[in-house]
Amino acid sequence: MLILGTGVTVLGVMRCLGRKQIPLYCLSEGLGFETRSRWCRRLSKRIGAFATISELEQILESTSIRDAVLIACSDHWTVEVTRLGGSLGERFRVCLPEAQVLSRFVNKAGFAELVKTAKVPHPFTEIPRSEEDVIELSRRFDGQLFLKPANSQRFQTTFGAKAFRIESTEQALSIFRRVREGGLDVMVQEYVPGPSDRHYFVDGFVDRNHLLCACFARRRLRMFPPDFGNSSYMVSVGLEDVAGAVQALETLFEAAGYRGIFSAEFKLDERDRQFKILEVNCRPWWYVQFAAECGVDVVEMAYCDALGMPFPTAKTYKTGVRLVFPYYDFHALQEMRRRGKPVLKEFLSSWIGAKSPLFSWDDPLPAVSDFADRVVKKLSLR
């Protein structure tokens, strides 16, 4: 398998495949701790995060690898690899939805229209076309909205944030102008009230026959930053706990004709007790290794499905398994402490015995490398 992308997701994918003795190569520039993995191999030619499909084709044409599966670990490459055609499309196979289906999920504006059409429970979402639209929406919802991007990856790279909470009309206009000046489209979405532990994720896999083969559910317990951050502490839960969310996904995927890996985020709205869908990632996610260790290896499923091979489906998985991302969770606990909440008991009960996305006994060096890099950067700043 050839892997496109960087970061924790790539490390998780490598471990899922490496433990199955599947040869793999990382194609992207900018890798850090991932290169310390025992399973990481590099090609002599590498590609940038936002390179074009023609640049990728040049690398694939020059490589001596004649037959492989491509897996993309970023939104950009997920879209780009669907454009491979001809002999390269036969040599390098993918397990993804058709391009027009994929665009409806990756582009948040298209996704908003899709969930409306499929009648899946979701927060109020609107695409402002002008400053007048922003003023009208911010006044109508009075602090219960936030601005989010149509293209998450480029927005995160440009602004260093996933979204912005709207606290006043003036602030909303300022952010809207900044985003539009950056050449990006933006959406306005209702903020579903409730703490971080109301967020649930349903991850899984849909095969080439559009059959939902596997689902894995987890509950977010802490996150950082507080409003629009990343999960720092979570636990696997049973599908019966998220039955409404699974049903919504089945409806959505059937309507769209979906295929491949997915990770869907929901928030339980206490006002009507419905799971409101927030987004669906059409690729491996940060904690794909966690799903595999609990019993749902979607990376192996995608690899086999791309090659037309049978694969074992996951009927059950381990529940009650906890995972902590120490770097982010340390900051989440610090935020709790600043709000006057005791954190020592939380720290001991959540960190002891929990899994980590970076550290693994059979592949320890990525975690050691990441820790050393963070210490060096901290000391350099001081």
Image: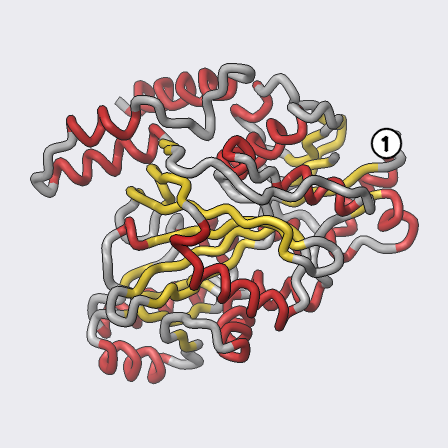
Q: Quarter of the image holding residue 250?
A: bottom right
Q: Height in image: 118 above or below 198?
A: below
Q: Secondary structure at mark 1?
A: loop
**x then y, percent, for residue 272:** 28, 71
Q: Is residue 285 above or below residue 182?
A: above
- Res. 55 visible in picture: no
Tell me if residue 58 comes above or below residue 244 in the rendering: above
Quarter of the image that includes the N terminus:
top right
At horizontal 11% and vertical 43% (from top left) the residue drawn is: 339
Q: Is 190 positioned to the left or the right of 41 in the image?
A: left
The residue drawn where x is 77% and y is 40% is: 69
Q: Quadrant of residue 5?
A: top right
Q: Position of residue 111 (x, y in %)?
A: 53, 69
Which amino acid does the dot numbered 1 rest on? Ile
Indicate left or right for 57 with 97 as reference.
right
Place of residue 303 in the rendered image (x, y in percent of width and height, measured from the top left): 73, 40
- Whether residue 115 is visible to the viewer of this picture, yes or no, is yes
Category of crowding for the residue at label 1, using alpha-carbon neighbours closer than 10 angstroms: few (below 14), some (14–19), many (at least 20): few
Residue at coordinates 28% horizontally, 49% vertically from top-left? 197
126 to 47, vertically: above or below: below
Of 10 and 195, nearer the camera is 195
Count every numbered label the image shows and give the total: 1
Between residues 126 and 29, which one lies in front from this camera angle? 126
Q: Which residue is mark 1?
A: 65
| Quadrant placement of the C terminus | top left
Q: Residue furthest left?
A: 340
Q: List the single residue furthest toward the right.
A: 87
Frontmost residue, 150 versus 254: 254
Residue ID at (34%, 47%): 229
Closer to the camera, 57 or 142? 142
- On the picture, is 328 further left or further right than 167? right
Expressed as whole percent of the image width and height from the top left, the position of residue 206 reads 65, 54
